[in-house]
Amino acid sequence: MEQERQVLMIFPHPDDEAFGVSGTIMKHIDNGTPVTYACLTLGQMGRNLGNPPFATRESLPKIREKELEAACAAMGITDLRKMGYRDKTLEFELQEDLVKMVTELIDELNPSLIISFYPGYSVHPDHEATASAVVEAVRQLDNKPKLHLVAFSHDSLEDLGEPNVVNDITGYEARKLKVLEAHASQTGPMLESLAADTQQAEAAKDMWLKSERFYQYEV
C-alpha cells in the first residue's frame, strides 16, 4: 500500500466505513498517514431498531453517534468530522452544495487519496449522492487526488470488471472486528453470522477480514 500524504474518507452513514474500508484505514494510520473521516449523517433513519426494540427514532441518532465515535477510536482516527446532514435526505440536497462541501474539505486537507463510494454502484440513494458529489468535486480540480471507490450492487459488477486496488489486511482481522462491533446496533446479524461454525462463515471471514477491494476511479 502506497504511503499517502493525507487520506480523506467520505461516507454518508456511521458504519459505512466499517465493512469494506476499516482495515485499509488502520494500515494507513499505522503507516503514519493522517486520516480524516467526514461522515455526512448520523444514520437517524437506520432500519435496525432491534427485536425487541433497543432504540426509538428519537434515541437512535445518539446511539449511532456514540457508535461512530467508538469505531473511530478503534481505528485510531482522531479527526472525525460530523457534517450534520440528515439521513435519507442527501439525494434531495442540491448537488452543487454537496460538491462545495467536498471541495472545502479538499482545499483544507490537501489529501493525496480520497476513499468513498463508486457512483452508480452503491445502491442506497445517500450513497449515490455522496459518490456523485465526491467525483464531481475532484473532476473540477487541477491537481487531483487519487480516488479509491467502493462498489457493490444488488445485481452485478461484471461491467466494472475486477477491483484494481486490493489491499491485504491480514493481521488486522481482530481490530476490524472491533470496528464492526462498535456499530453493534447495525452489525449484530453480520457478527452473528461470522461467529457461526460453518463453511459459509469461514468464507465470509475470508471475504471481509483478509482483504479490501477498491476501484481506482479516473476523472
Image (cartoon, rainbow, N blue to C red):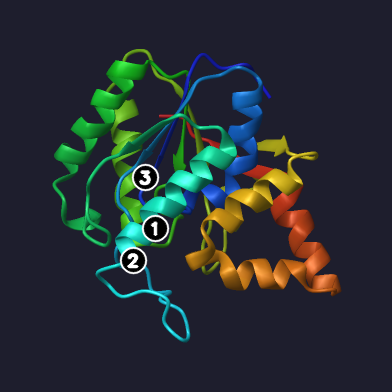
The residue shown at (41%, 82%) is 53
Q: Position of residue 41 (x, y in %)?
A: 30, 51
Residue at 23%, 54% in the rendered image: 90
Q: Nearer the viewer, residue 95 or 192?
A: 192
From mark 1 to mark 2, how far is it between C-alphas? 6 Å
Q: Considering the numbered disc 1 on the image, is that residue within a helix, a strand or a loop?
A: helix
- Dot 2 surroundings within 10 Å: few (below 14), some, or many (20 or more)? many
For badge 2, the amino acid type reads Leu
Q: Place residue 40 in its image quadrant.
A: top left
Task: Kindly indicate whether the residue at mark 2 contacts the one at mark 1 (C-beta within 8 angstroms).
Answer: yes
Residue at 74% from the left image edge and 63% from the top image edge: 204
Q: Quadrant of residue 192?
A: bottom right
Q: Residues within 10 Å of mark 1 (few under 14, many from 20)?
A: many
| Residue extending furthest toward the bottom | 52
Q: Specify the amino acid type for callout 1.
A: Arg
Circle 3: is it few (<14), some (14-19), or many (20+) Cα within 10 Å?
many
Residue tagged 3:
131
- Please tell me which of labels 3 and 1 falls first in the chain: 1
Mark in front: 3 vs 2: 2
Q: Which residue is mark 1?
A: 64
Name the residue that disc number 2 marks: 60
